[in-house]
Image (spheres, grey):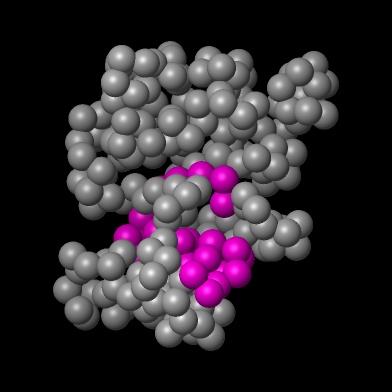
């Protein structure tokens, strides 16, 4: 069984089903990419996997355990971390205060050890540790959000549009960080990304969502090579 198994999952808000009948598996140390046109339900799917929206049907299994109806904090304790596109940091607080809040439930010694590990991965954070978040650049904020997610010590990290509003140079750096997290730290990454071509280049497997419906699931390279799908849904 894979690290994350999604079986016939349908999610949405209140009475409105947004994503229907999704099936996929994320393996250990795998980069899994979700792409598709705007408004296809990609972000809603991630929220469903983390327990933030309504489940209309199906199952979510993490590490062999059914987490379909668990609250988000329990999913986090089981090794699932979620970095939303918006609202992923506290603007009026310092970087240090954000990191403390991200690990508020940890004993001091454990927090200290995890923070040391995170700063080895993202050493640049030390430069702006005492600055207010609202003074940071887009790239610095994204780095902080990633650090907050890594403090949870996940084995599966879900990232929603991490390169949104970043320059091409900073976006390339984010993609490189994703590769390094998989290679050097053994993480699995579930990535929703607006830059579909670049995401598919680094991905192992991919899911193409269109209007809440799965149109492709398989090797990322196969989706890249499909001229018809790329033309119809990826703007190529």
Give the image location of residue 178, x and y in percent: 58, 56
Determine if the magenta segment contains residue 146.
yes
Q: Residue at x 34, y 47 (%)?
A: 80
**Would you place residue 60 above or below residue 76 in this image?**
above
Left/right placement of residue 61 relative to residue 139 reads left
Q: Residue at x 36, y 31 (%)?
A: 48
Determine if the magenta segment contains residue 193.
no
User: Which image quarter holds the C terminus?
Assistant: top right
Give the image location of residue 221, x and y in percent: 72, 33
Please give the range of residues in magenta.
134-162
**Would you place residue 59 above or below residue 4 in this image?**
above
Nearest the eye: 233 or 32: 233
Nearest the eye: 86 or 4: 86
User: Which image quarter holds the N terminus?
Assistant: top left
Q: Residue at x 33, y 75 (%)?
A: 97
Give the image location of residue 197, x and y in percent: 74, 39
Left/right placement of residue 70 relative to residue 145 reads left
Nearest the eye: 132 or 23: 132
Q: Residue at x 56, y 24 (%)?
A: 40
Give the image location of residue 24, x and y in percent: 47, 25
Looking at the rendered structure, the number of numbered marks drawn on it comes to 0
Identify the image quadrant of residue 35. top right
Left/right placement of residue 66 relative to residue 17 reads left
Identify the image quadrant of residue 39. top right
Residue 178 appearing in the image: yes
């Amino acid at each position: 069984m894979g690290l994350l198994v999604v079986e016939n999952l349908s999610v949405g808000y209140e009475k409105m089903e947004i994503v229907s009948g999704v099936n996929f598996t994320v393996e250990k140390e795998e980069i899994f990419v979700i792409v598709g046109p705007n408004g296809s339900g990609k972000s809603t799917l991630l929220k469903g996997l983390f327990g933030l929206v309504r489940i209309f049907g199906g199952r979510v299994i993490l590490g062999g355990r059914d987490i379909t109806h668990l609250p988000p904090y329990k999913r986090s304790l089981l090794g699932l971390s979620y970095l939303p596109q918006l609202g992923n940091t506290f603007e009026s607080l310092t970087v240090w205060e954000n990191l403390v809040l991200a690990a508020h439930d940890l004993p001091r010694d454990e927090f200290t050890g995890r923070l040391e590990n995170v700063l080895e991965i993202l050493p640049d954070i030390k430069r702006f540790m005492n600055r207010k978040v609202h003074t940071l650049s887009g790239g610095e904020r994204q780095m902080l959000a990633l650090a907050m997610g890594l403090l949870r010590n996940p084995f599966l990290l879900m990232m929603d549009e991490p390169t949104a509003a970043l320059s091409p140079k900073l976006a390339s750096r984010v993609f490189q960080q994703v590769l390094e997290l998989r290679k050097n730290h053994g993480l699995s990454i579930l990535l929703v990304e607006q830059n579909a071509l670049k995401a598919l280049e680094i991905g192992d497997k991919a899911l193409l969502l269109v209007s809440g419906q799965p149109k492709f699931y398989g090797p990322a390279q196969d989706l890249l090579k499909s001229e018809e799908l790329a033309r119809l849904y990826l703007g190529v």
